[in-house]
Image (spheres, rainbow, N blue to C red):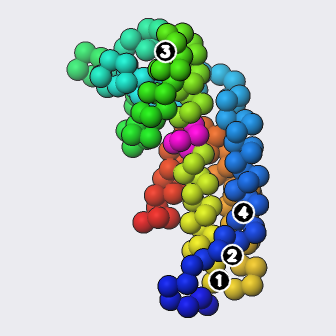
Amino acid sequence: MRPPGASHPISPAALGAVLFAGALQLALVNFWPGFPSPNEWPRAYQAMAVVGRASLAIDAEVGRYGGSEDLAAGRGGLYPNKAPGMLPLLLPAAALAHVASGGDDARELRLTLWLGRLLAASLPFLLTVLLLDAATFSSGPGGGRVVVLTYALASPALAASLLLFSHALSACLLLAG
């Protein structure tokens, strides 16, 4: 048991998991999935709409890039049928993509998806691994390492952290709470 106020060093297990997962995320996040994901594209469309047109409706983006199963119609427009909790994390990605794309629509979408996955899914996953490491630090010999490595490498959490699914963000916020 650590004394009150003592800082928790990052365990070798957590550090290894974070480095491995981080490298894997950087290598795969732009290539998987290889299809227009109905879970991701409407979220990216909405971030792009807010940045480019100051609108939550994604009609223009659907017209430009194609439709998706995960859309909802309302008030004369189309909207993602996803909870909007990831949108604040996607806005910096969409803003950077908007500037860096140089007006190339396809590049803007690719960059928004890539940066958005890193900011809204991969980063919260890595933070969750570190929070879990801190939470299980005093759980006994080896107990914390097993929990951290199981979560980081042997659960669906890593796969979810490669996509704009809200799973990684939700896990991070729940553990932080």
**Tag on residue 67?**
3
The earlier-in-sequence mark between 3 and 4 is: 4
Residue displayed at 63% across by 70% down: 133
Look at discs 3 and 1 and give the one toward the viewer.
Answer: 1
Which residue, given by chain and number where applicable, does mark 4 sit on? 15
Which residue, given by chain and number where applicable, does mark 2 sit on? 144
Q: Position of residue 104 (x, y in %)?
A: 54, 10
The earlier-in-sequence mark between 3 and 1 is: 3
The earlier-in-sequence mark between 2 and 4 is: 4
Amino acid, disc 3 = Gly
Task: Please say if 90 is above or below 153.
Answer: above
Q: Measure the alpha-carbon separation of dots 3 and 1.
A: 48 Å
Amino acid, disc 1 = Ser
Q: Measure the alpha-carbon separation of dots 2 and 3.
A: 44 Å
Mark 2 in CB contact with mark 1 (< 8 angstroms): yes
Q: Do we see residue 51 in this rendering? A: yes
Residue displayed at 56% across by 66% down: 131
- Residue 88 placement, left or right of 9: left
Task: Please say if 13 is above or below 136.
Answer: above
Q: Which residues are magenta?
A: 117-121
